[in-house]
Amino acid sequence: MSKRPIRHISEGPRGHPWTLLLLAGVLVASITLTSLDAVNSVLIFILEVVFVIFFARHLIFAVSAMRTADTDLTLPPNADQFTPPITVLVACKNEESVVDALVASLLDFDYPGDHLQVIIVDDGSTDSTAERLDAWAARTPALHVIHRHPHAGGGKSGALNTALEIATGEVIVVFDADHQPNKDVLWRLSRHFEDPGVGAVQGRCTIVNPDDTPLTRLIAIDYLAGYLVNEYGRQSIYRLPAYGGANCAVRASSLRALGGWNPNTVTEDTDLTLNLILDGQRVRYDVTAVDREEGVVTLSRYWRQRYRWARGHQEVWRDYRWQVWRSDRLTRTEKVETMMFLLVFHLPVLSFLGLILLVPWLLGITHPYDAVHAYVLWTLLFLGPLMELGAGLLVARAPRRWALSLIFFLPLFFVSVALCTKAWWDGMLGRPYTWVKTSRSADPVVVPS
């Protein structure tokens, strides 16, 4: 295992307008030298190939989950449990609606008290979060509270790095403020670090409020697919699950050797995942380490949350794609899977391109080489994700009525197309963006200007 720090690449907004100009130039030149029909046909064929590849990935993950996830869900902790010293970290910013439930759950872990340190960072809150945390700390010596200045910067990464300076645990476990972990989560996450090659472990997150709105129900189903099918498949087939940023653990020595969490990205979890695997360490996924979190209840909050995920994920792809291909730590298959993982938030952008190609075809302006290919394109586009969603419902043994919520998948898909395309465009132009906290269900609704 290498001890040299891997430099965090993202150091500020860096646009790529020349790429946009190059793409536009190639498209104009192609139409000029051939015809609009020919260009349309070639682009549809390319999209078909991409969607076939990702469809196969969805299918493999779904089959893997259906075959073995049900058994793994019931695995107990080891009899002779490995119990390293653990530090639990949480960054809080204006979390008065959830902070009391959070602290209560963090103080209720079934883990040896002399091996556990709990640190909560008040990241410049302007509501009553700081006062509530201080009240808990006054009557609970085991709880350490750090207050950051409102303009300290760095977002979640900056807050966690501040806490890392006083963390004493060999393993750092991170939760978000709205999370309610099971009492045995620390046992289940920590056992993997007995293997010195493991740098981080991801647990499984579920949605605590699936009945609040149709949106939260669909998010709950999306989480079932994400954690019981997609993340599970990446673990069982490629041994390449992702560190997800909450309900997760990282080896403290590995984290410090890599310079801590990257404050220059809005998806510090994906950034850390890439740093770890490029350094020759492994991330593991424990499907039995479960906690619950809130699903966003309004479309505007969904947009802001998923835009942040898309913007950060796309930036990590731009930052690390060449390092992945040149890495001598990954096999060729692992490189391909890592690239596909990083390109997930680019697929809706390609779907937007597909919509652009679809309009002139429906209007009779263009006549692709074979209209059947257009139907195949959209069938593959929807069938893959739907297969994962359905497999997630089956593995989790979710109520049958939940399947009816899949009708909302189509409109939400177009929302994802819009937000991912905007994130890609903004990222290519280098428009500044900073980390934005996800609003909670009890927070007042703020309409974006």
Image: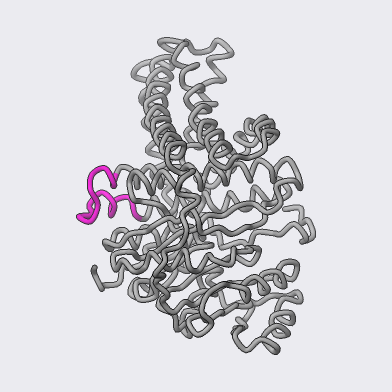
Q: Does the magenta stretch include residue 333?
A: yes
Residue 346 or residue 242, whichever sits in front = 242
In this image, 151 relative to 36: left or right?
A: right
The image position of residue 388, as x and y in percent, is: 51, 35
The image position of residue 390, as x and y in percent, is: 56, 33
Q: Which residue lies furthest to the front in this view?
A: 79
The image position of residue 224, as x and y in percent, is: 56, 44
Instruction: Name above or below for residue 126 compared with residue 391.
Output: below
Q: Residue at x 52, y 68 (%)?
A: 174
Q: Residue at x 28, y 54 (%)?
A: 323
The image position of residue 75, as x and y in percent, is: 46, 54
The magenta segment: 320-335
Camera sees residue 319: yes
The secondary structure that most of the magenta stretch takes on is helix
In this image, 236 relative to 407: left or right?
A: left
Residue 103 or residue 184, whichever sits in front = 184
Residue 382 or residue 65, whichever sits in front = 65
In this image, 81 relative to 100: left or right?
A: left
Q: Residue at x 45, y 56 (%)?
A: 286
Residue 340 or residue 184, whichever sits in front = 184
The quarter of the picture where the N terminus appears is bottom left
Instruction: Name above or below for residue 231 compared with residue 253.
Output: above
Instruction: Name above or below for residue 309 compared with residue 117.
Output: above
Q: How many marks?
A: 0
